[in-house]
Amino acid sequence: MRFWKNMENKAYNREQDTDLTGSPETRVQGMEPFWGEWYLDHRLGSGVYGDVWQIHRGEETAALKVISISEEKIPDERLRLEGFDQNGYHTYMESVIRQAEREYDTLCLFDNDPHIVQCEEGLRAGSTDEWIMLIRMEKLETLQDHFRKVPLTVPEVIRIGIHMCKALESCEKKGILHRDLAPGNIFYDVRTDAYKLGDFGMAQSMAEAHEMPEKAGTYTAPEVYRDNAFSALSDEYSLGLILYRMINDFRLPFQPLYPVSFTHKERSLALFRRLSGEAPPPPRILIRSPTEDPAEIAGIGAQVSPATIDSGRRLAEAVMKAIEPDPRKRYVSASAFRAALECL
Ligand SMILES: Nc1ncnc2c1ncn2[C@@H]1O[C@H](COP(=O)(O)OP(=O)(O)O)[C@@H](O)[C@H]1O
Ligand SMILES: [Mg+2]
């Protein structure tokens, strides 16, 4: 087993016997205690290649992202069905691990940034056909958990926008495109009362941004879908769309307004219209009557108070500019978007 580097970028040279066989879960349990002193509490979330766990060292807690890839002995027939031979599959798995290493390296670029999730230590263990990567991060709250406790108000939506613009400004300075801005990748830090951008698993440097995204996601900008042209303006767009949804009763453009329910097919159609470059309708906050009761909203379970309808209107205008289908009509940078939000 080979240890990767720690935060100080020194080799972490403690040797530890680890059995990498078995299910991903038993593999993780077999590595306890992590860095000699951290123990598993419970799973916080799951991703494509692994889980995020809460861990503790005495009273202290942290989040541990585990990316576990094992090249099981796959029968030739199944490999052929998936379009691989044994060699091709190995190359594919190696590229997945490289992207995971890049996630850690990228996070390390943002040491002490108040609006980016802080990573503390990372390690990689593996042989030719078994890899495991661990990234220890500060433990934060998901937006969903946070807004279960406090209501989502217009001033708070503006604050999320400002904090995420600051995160994107830091990314621009380092030449990084995040490429996966979504509510699930924004966290809340109780200690600093700040929102933080996390999950750099899709991030790329601006120099290599010609690579295709895996798929067009819920918050992908139209130019990415149409022309595969990803720029900092595409991250700005995704942020705008996240804010749009928060002031549109948690509905995305072209979805029927709350509380009308919709089918999977209508959802796909709304996504297609947005990605094709059709101009989105203004968010519902603009047409909601100030006397209307705040609606109990599904989704992340929060509500936008109608008491702040005026700043809501101005927020809606800023958001509409950020989600212009034509990137040239958006704010020229995250700092310009932030300046607009700070004036509201
Ligand atoms: N620092 C953290 N603190 C608390 N929970 C976290 C943290 N990082 C991730 N999580 C939880 O794990 C989930 C997946 O993490 P994420 O880094 O977004 O991975 P993925 O690439 O799988 O989306 C998140 O949605 C969240 O629930
Ligand atoms: Mg994520």
Image (cartoon, rainbow, N blue to C red):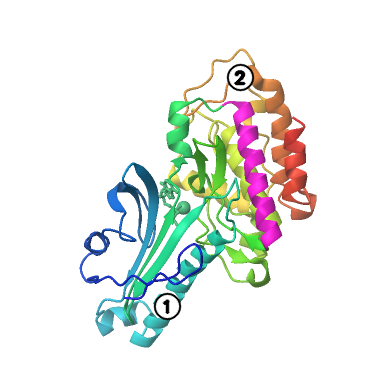
**Image position of 220 with respect to 18: above or below:** above
**Image position of 274 with respect to 3: above or below:** above
Residue 235 visible somewhere in the drawing = yes
**Image position of 133 with respect to 329: above or below:** below
- On-image quarter of the N terminus: bottom left
Q: Is residue 170 magenta?
A: yes
Q: Residue at x 28, y 51 (%)?
A: 40
Q: Which residue is mark 1?
A: 94
Residue type highlighted by circle 1: Glu
Q: CA distance from mark 2 to mark 1?
A: 51 Å
**Image position of 204 with respect to 331: above or below:** below
Q: Position of residue 103 (x, y in %)?
A: 50, 63
Q: Nearer the viewer, residue 32 or 233?
A: 32
Q: Earlier in the sequence, mark 2 or mark 1?
A: 1
Circles 2 and 1 in contact, beta carbons < 8 Å: no
Q: Is mark 1 within 8 Å of ligand 1?
A: no
Q: Is residue 166 magenta?
A: yes
- On-image quarter of the C terminus: top right
Q: Position of residue 253 (x, y in %)?
A: 60, 41
Residue type highlighted by circle 2: Pro
From the viewer's perspective, tell me whether residue 294 is left or right of residue 36.
Answer: right
Badge 1 crowding class, 10 Å Cα cut-off, few under 14, some 14 to 19, many 20 or more, is: some
Q: Quarter of the image holding residue 18?
A: bottom left
Secondary structure found at label 1: helix
Secondary structure found at label 2: helix
Magenta residues, start to end: 153-174
Q: Which residue is mark 2?
A: 306
Residue 277 visible somewhere in the drawing = no
Q: Quarter of the image holding residue 216?
A: bottom right
Badge 2 crowding class, 10 Å Cα cut-off, few under 14, some 14 to 19, many 20 or more, is: some
Q: Position of residue 335 (x, y in %)?
A: 75, 47
